[in-house]
Image: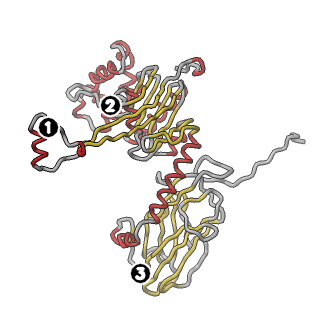
């Protein structure tokens, strides 16, 4: 580990790799189909068989010490790619070259024998990873401590919870001293302490020069953990390069497609909101429509940092309501509460409302940095003792990569830098 990549052959190579799975469609119970099934010599109907190619002509090279994130929608071929690297699957076409020991965090505990204890399964799985019995014995205390199983280590694993199962599988895999570590969304399981320990272990691997390839549905995790990203879609490589660039392209394309899809949805879908568990209130005042507008008044779902943003709220008050309060809240999709302004906090007093009307909240320069955000809206009385209508995180706001300026974190401070090359006088 930690060898100069420039003097070594690539750790991993994919050369025009394709993978095919046959899909079988159930035949109708007709006389010809029954004859084909039970009489030898009759050829099957080819119309009931088709091929599925999760990967087509995929080529890339990974050098030692790289950390590569794989992004793409569901069904893009990401997990298939990892299983090909481990040898769980064989390519239908092309060639895969792996020059080192591989440890995978794909299906943790898949090789466990349920009747064996945790300790016995450590020996079993360690041998599968290529460790000698002496090497396993030396690492046993660290594996047990990392898994946090305590006295349960000598209990048959069939009595383990799913969390204990995963922790033991992870602990074994990360103590094999691999050259290449594969991770498939495993960090999405377990409690917060386990996830934190897992991330710390991955950081340690990276510092030691271990090559890491991981799949994640979190663009933020790909950006924070990897220097390079590969975008897979429809079984092909759509982009391969610096993680910041690839993730930005992937998000922009995904959000544009999603926005177009939402615009094409029939208006009758709005009628389903009455049954939405994320909306409640007495109904004296109803929020009937919400739009996110740019500086030209055009409706959009995605904005760049620094652009003007207006949240337009159309309402209808069924009775005369004195001094109502309108507010909104913005959460990042990981749950972080960003802000929660309302008309009362801002000193914007509304004497009364009755019938239809519009309230707007304008942000002259959006301070949020790239990411996905959810907007909640509320209308309540002045004392905040009656909620007329509440929409809990029902509206999406996408913030794209900044055209210039700050890039990392939650928001930009919009500060200014200065420099004096002459020193202090």
Q: Is residue 146 visible?
A: no
The front one of 106 and 23 is 23
Q: Nearer the viewer, mark 1 or mark 3?
A: 1
- The colour scheme used here is secondary structure
In the rendered image, the vertical position of residue 191 relative to residue 307, given as above or below: above
Residue at image position (84%, 44%) is: 420
Which residue sits furthest right?
425
Could you tell which of marks 2 and 3 lies nearer the N-terminus?
2
| 125 lies above or below 273 | above
Front-most of residues 30 and 23: 30
On the rendered image, what quadrant is the C terminus found in? Answer: top right
- Disc tally is 3
User: For numbered disc 3, what is the local secondary structure?
Assistant: loop
In this rendering, the label closer to the viewer, 1 or 2: 1
Point out the tag, 1 or 2, that comes first from the N-terminus: 1
Residue tagged by mark 2?
Answer: 149
Give the residue drawn at x 54%, y 26%: 63
The secondary structure type at the circle numbered 2 is loop
- Do the residues under discs 1 and 3 have CB atoms within 8 angstroms? no
Residue position marked by numbered label 3 in the rendering: 284
Regarding residue 96, the answer to whether it shows in the image is: yes
For label 2, the crowd category at 10 Å Cα-Cα, with few meaning under 14, some 14 to 19 and many 20 or more, is some
Which one is in front, 324 or 6?
Answer: 6
Q: Is residue 383 above or below residue 117?
A: below
Residues at marks 1 and 3, CA–CA distance in whole angstroms: 71 Å
Circle 1 is placed at which residue position?
Answer: 42
- Label 3 neighbour load within 10 Å: few <14, some 14-19, many 20+: some
Are the residues flagged by discs 1 and 2 in contact, CB closer than 8 Å?
no
Residue 142 shown left or right of residue 372 in the figure: left
């Amino acid at each position: 580990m930690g060898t100069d990549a420039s003097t070594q052959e690539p750790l991993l190579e994919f050369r025009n790799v394709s993978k095919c799975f046959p899909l079988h469609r159930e035949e109708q119970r007709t006389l010809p189909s029954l004859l084909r099934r039970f009489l030898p010599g009759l050829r099957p109907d080819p119309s009931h068989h088709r091929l599925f190619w999760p990967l087509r002509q995929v080529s890339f090279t990974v050098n030692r010490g790289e950390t590569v994130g794989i992004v793409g929608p569901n069904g893009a071929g990401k997990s298939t790619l990892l299983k090909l690297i481990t040898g769980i699957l064989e390519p239908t076409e092309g060639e895969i070259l792996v020059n080192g020991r591989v440890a995978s965090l794909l299906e943790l505990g898949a090789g466990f024998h349920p009747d064996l204890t945790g300790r016995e399964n450590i020996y079993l799985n360690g041998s599968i990873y290529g460790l000698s019995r002496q090497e396993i014995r030396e690492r046993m205390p660290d594996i047990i401590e990392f898994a946090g199983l305590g006295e349960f280590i000598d209990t048959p694993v069939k009595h383990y919870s799913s969390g204990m199962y995963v922790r033991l599988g992870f602990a074994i895999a990360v103590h094999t001293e691999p050259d290449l570590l594969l991770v498939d969304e495993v960090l999405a399981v377990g409690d917060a302490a386990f996830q934190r320990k897992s991330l710390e272990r991955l950081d340690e691997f990276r510092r030691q020069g271990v090559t890491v390839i991981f799949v994640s549905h979190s663009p933020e995790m790909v950006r924070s953990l990897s220097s390079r990203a590969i975008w897979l879609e429809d079984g092909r490589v759509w982009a391969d390069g610096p993680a910041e660039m690839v993730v930005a392209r992937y998000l922009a394309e995904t959000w544009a497609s999603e926005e177009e899809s939402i615009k094409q949805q029939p208006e009758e879908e709005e009628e389903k909101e009455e049954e939405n568990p994320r909306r409640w209130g007495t109904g004296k005042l109803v929020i009937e429509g919400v739009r996110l507008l740019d500086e030209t008044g055009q409706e959009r779902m995605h904005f760049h940092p620094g652009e003007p943003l207006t949240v337009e709220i159309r309402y209808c008050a069924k009775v005369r309501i004195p001094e109502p309060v309108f507010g909104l809240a913005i959460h990042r999709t990981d749950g972080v509460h960003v802000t929660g302004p309302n008309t009362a906090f801002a000193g914007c007093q509304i004497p009364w409302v009755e019938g239809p009307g519009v309230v707007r909240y304008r942000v002259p320069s959006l301070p949020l940095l790239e990411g996905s955000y959810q907007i909640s809206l509320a209308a309540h009385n002045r004392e905040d003792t009656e909620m007329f209508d509440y929409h809990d995180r029902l509206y999406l706001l996408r913030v794209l990569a900044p055209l210039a300026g700050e890039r990392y974190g939650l928001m930009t401070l919009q500060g200014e830098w200065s420099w004096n090359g002459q020193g202090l006088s």
